[in-house]
Amino acid sequence: MVMLQLSQIDVLPGQRIVLQNVDWQQFEDIIAELGEHRSSRIAYSQGTLEIMTPLPEHEVIKGLVGDIVKILLEEKVTID
């Protein structure tokens, strides 16, 4: 078996890595090591772990959608 450190893995923007047979404890250890302020997105389901890094343009769109939602919520609060 080959063991790698998370710091050895570089997921480029727009790419993803899928790992099979990851148990829940390993998943929690990976989340803890990566920390909360990470650029990658992580999904886990039934032993399959996917790590992906979105493209910068997707992050811009995410920010715009978030701003629109905030504006709509502010307007709804002022109407009620």
Image (cartoon, helix red, strand yellow):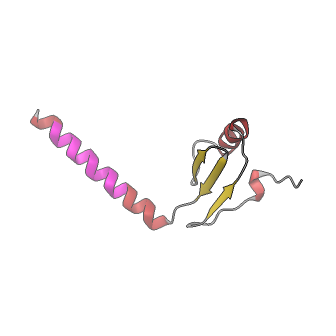
Residue 79 at x, y percent in the picture: 10, 37
Q: Is residue 3 left or right of residue 69?
A: right
Occupied quadrant, residue 24? top right
**Residue under the image location 70 percent in, 43 percent down:** 30
Q: Is residue 61 left or right of residue 49?
A: left
Occupied quadrant, residue 26? top right
The answer to which of 80 and 17 lies nearer the viewer is: 17
Residue 12 at x, y percent in the picture: 62, 66
Residue at the far top: name it. 80
- The answer to whether residue 31 is above or below residue 7 is above
Residue 68 at x, y percent in the picture: 26, 52
The answer to which of 27 and 73 lies nearer the viewer is: 27
Residue at the far right: name it. 1
Residue 21 covered by magenta stretch = no
- The answer to whether residue 12 is above or below residue 66 is below
- Highlighted magenta segment, given as a residue range: 63-76
**Residue under the image location 48 percent in, 65 percent down:** 56
**Residue under the image location 44 percent in, 63 percent down:** 58
Q: Is residue 33 left or right of residue 70?
A: right
**Residue under the image location 23 percent in, 47 percent down:** 71
Prevailing secondary structure class for the magenta stretch in the rendered image: helix
Residue 40 at x, y percent in the picture: 58, 54
Q: Disc count in the image?
A: 0
The answer to which of 43 and 58 lies nearer the viewer is: 43
Residue at the far front: name it. 46
